[in-house]
Amino acid sequence: MGETQKALVYRKPGDYGLDDVPVPKIVESGDCIGKVTLSTICGSDIHIVHGGMADVRYPIVVGHEFCAEIVETGPEVKRLKVGDKVVTSCVAFCGECWYCKQGLYAHCTTPRYGCFGVYGQEGCQTTYVLMPGADNYAYNIPDGLTEQDVLFTGDILSTGYFGAENADIKINDVVAVVGAGPVGMCCMATTKLWGPSQVIAVDTVQSRLDVCVKEGIADIGLNPLEVNVPEVIREMTGGRGADKTIECVGAKPTFDLALEIVRGGGNMSTIGVFEKPVDLPLDKIWAKNIKLGWGFVPMNKMPELINLIAKGKLNTNFLCTHKAPLNDIMRGYDIFGNKKENCLKWLVTPWEK
Ligand SMILES: [Zn+2]
Ligand SMILES: [Zn+2]
């Protein structure tokens, strides 16, 4: 019997909890062991533990957004050293296959790699994590920044940025972001980098819209329960609609709304995680001449995002509404998963009692 550690385990669809699992050991010469210094629950973890995401292997330790201290390195690790404090990509990748050479890291085809806690290695909602080929995707946290400052670059901030990038925003565009959850908020924060004239946040949770406006990531919040969103946006834009819309939920009603509010010839991008197939109104998409961009993040913009944070141009600390030790993580799944207590992100600190 080797040593064990506590971890949040997805046992089977709908069944998850804190279990004892083996402490990982280095397997190949390019591997590192990371001691988790800060992690978090992602919206996709909620989909995973409820069995809503296809192809997730189980049992598996859940979690893919984390910072770590490197505590052991294999003999062929070149860049990282023991003691390094890093933030890691949610996707571990080899850096050598055809997809990795194109920078499409999330499509890495080398079998050991993939998203932590989903279909790759065991995840981070624990204390020690095996990080294969960590030289490729674990970035040193710059001096003067904390784990919390950079934590989201490994997943939701990269995802939000990807959504904005795919919308191809031009200076002075009016951009509507449908869905003001943590990913939507990251998308709004990065949308601002392109210099739009207005960012419109759309969500049915008023408290989240209020956060967007208060934090300056949106100029206005529109609640479909209160106003006719397409009508208000048309009034704001000379009858046309938003130049670009970004859908950050992954459901039919939000997809349709984002399509309804984009102007003719505009762009629509979607980064929401769809749990099931959705009928696409291709007739409307054709008739409006909409360019679509979508998919999950290739994870190739972390260095740029870390740099923007270091320069003070991007700040996501307002998302950190809750923070508790690993032992309390089931409470985190309830509070974050069910959007209680105005929770935006639940941070996990493994080393506090
Ligand atoms: Zn995620
Ligand atoms: Zn690869």
Image (spheres, rainbow, N blue to C red):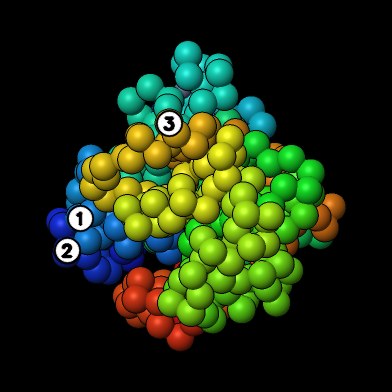
Other-residue count near label 2 (Cα within 10 Å), few / some / many at <14 / 14–19 / ≥20: few
Q: Residues within 10 Å of mark 3 (few under 14, many from 20)?
A: few
Question: Mark 2 is on which residue type?
Answer: Gly
* Of labels 1 and 3, the one closer to you: 3
Where does residue 112 sit, x and y in percent of width and height? 35, 29
Query: Badges 1 and 3: C-beta atoms under 8 Å apart?
Result: no
Query: What is the secondary structure assignment of the residue under circle 2?
Result: loop
Query: What amino acid type should be assigned to the residue bearing mark 3?
Result: Trp
Residue 25 placement (x, y as % from top left): 38, 43
Q: CA distance from mark 3 to mark 2?
A: 40 Å
Q: Does the rendering let one see residue 297? A: no
Q: Which residue is mark 2?
A: 14
Q: Secondary structure at mark 3?
A: helix
Residue on which disc 3 sits: 286
Using the image as rendered, state which of residue 241 and residue 44 is in the foreground. 241
Q: Residue at x 68, y 55 (%)?
A: 238
**In front: 211, or 151?**
211
Q: CA distance from mark 1 to mark 3?
A: 34 Å
Residues at badges 1 and 2 in contact (C-beta under 8 Å)?
yes
Q: Earlier in the sequence, mark 1 or mark 2?
A: 2
Residue 146: image quadrant is bottom right
